[in-house]
Amino acid sequence: MGETMKLPLVFDAPTRGKPPRHFADLDDDARSAAITELGLPAFRGKQLANHYFGRLTADAHAMTDLPAAMREQVAGALFPPLLKVVRAIECDGAQTRKTLWRAVDGTTIESVLMRYPNRSTLCLSSQAGCGMACPFCATGQGGLTRNLSTAEILEQVRAAAAVMRDQHDGRLSNIVFMGMGEPLANYNRVLAAVKRIIAPPPHGFGISARSVTVSTVGVAPAIRKLADERLGVTLALSLHAPDDELRDTLVPVNNRWNVGEALDAARYYADVTGRRVSIEYALIRDVNDQPWRGDLLGKKLHGALGPLVHVNVIPLNPTPGSEWDASPKPVEREFVKRVRERGVSCTVRDTRGREIAAACGQLAAEG
Ligand code: SAH
């Protein structure tokens, strides 16, 4: 984040357990520098990028077009193993797969791969834990452990793309930053990861920018900054309440950037990028599901964003130990109706992975 941005302490994730430098951390310039440092000719950099982003290989020993001695050198210097699979579990007829990963320092994180008839979506983590403390979210209950490095984020993508290619004869088409963590509180590393995700091979994985969604609690200055990067990725704003009184409790960062400020920033994002902003709204029985709140939500969104908005209602996934639950279906239907009556498009999100604790807000890694 820029030096001028004053952010609360919660954004300063501990730096201990910093993962080793990896090929995927490097942008094009840093990559050239690293290749030179190793005493290798420049074309080797492009070769490595082809392996990593094109062939989805992070094992230098398998890069057989490199001389054997060079493979050893490159493996040690640029491809330290960053994430090991601890457990992978499937549900929804094997359409949903949750992976628990362990990083070099023992930190655990999760990602979820969801397959649909015409697309496949990876829900990935940007931090180990989360400092935003939203009371309905399992990750929020555990606090923040640390930021993930760019390469740790990209390794989740590479692994999912390899699963799609090798096991399903398909490709990974969509990425959502909706796993563990607040992506905009790990701004620089997330930005570098997004750039690599959308760059065409061999510079990146070549996933279409509009198929990448960055989801945030509403860090207003970072939303504006992301807009100015003009990457064309989709922004999702986790609103969960149209009024400050309730949002102060559901999304504690609202005390810093309130509903109005978050919506102003979202408007800026929509104006600069021309892209429709998604509003996430976890519907919680008797907490934020009143018809009048549906009216107010529709009114405020229509006023702030006009046609450049879509509301995703997410039936609350109850987390262990919480007394909160999803709203009954008739209440949900009425809420959606109220939002739509204000001229705002609104749908209910299909939730995957409930029985393996892989649904929205259920990611809370255990070793
Ligand atoms: N920090 C980012 C990403 C979080 S996860 C953000 O807040 O946007 C993605 C979405 O899942 C967020 O909208 C989050 O509020 C929502 N979510 C968290 N816990 C949930 C739960 N228990 N049920 C339904 N949605 C939940």
Image: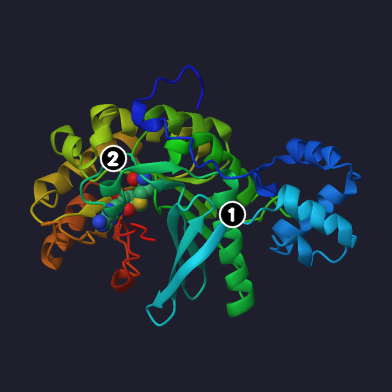
Question: What residue is rendered at 25% in x and 32% in y?
Answer: 254
Question: What residue is rendered at 29% in x and 73% in y?
Answer: 355
Mark 1 belongs to which amino acid?
Answer: Leu
In this rendering, the answer to whether 140 lies above or below 330 is above
Q: Which mark is residue 302?
A: 2
Question: What residue is rendered at 78% in x and 57% in y?
Answer: 50
Badge 1, how many Cα within 10 Å: few under 14, some, many 20+? some
**In the rendered view, does 58 fall on the left or right side of 256?**
right
**In the rendered view, does 89 fall on the left or right side of 252?**
right
Quarter of the view holding residue 161: bottom right
Residue at the extreme top: 4
Element on which disc 2 rests: helix
Mark 2 belongs to which amino acid?
Answer: His
Please tell me whether mark 2 or mark 1 is closer to you in this view.
1
Counting from the top left corner in percent of width and height, residue 250 is at 20, 42
**In the rendered view, does 41 fall on the left or right side of 314?**
right
Counting from the top left corner in percent of width and height, residue 143 is at 31, 43
Q: Work out whether residue 311 can be spotted.
A: no
In this rendering, the answer to whether 358 lies above or below 185 is below
Q: Are marks 2 and 1 in contact (CB under 8 Å)?
A: no
Q: Which mark is residue 224?
A: none
Question: What residue is rendered at 89% in x and 45% in y?
Answer: 40
Counting from the top left corner in percent of width and height, residue 229 is at 57, 33
Counting from the top left corner in percent of width and height, residue 255 is at 23, 28
Q: Work out whether residue 260 can be spotted.
A: yes
Query: Along the polypeptide, which appears first: circle 2 or circle 1?
Result: 1
- Compare residues 91 and 103 and report the one nearer the observer: 103
**Residue under pointer 1:** 82
Which part of the image, by quadrant, shows the C terminus?
bottom left
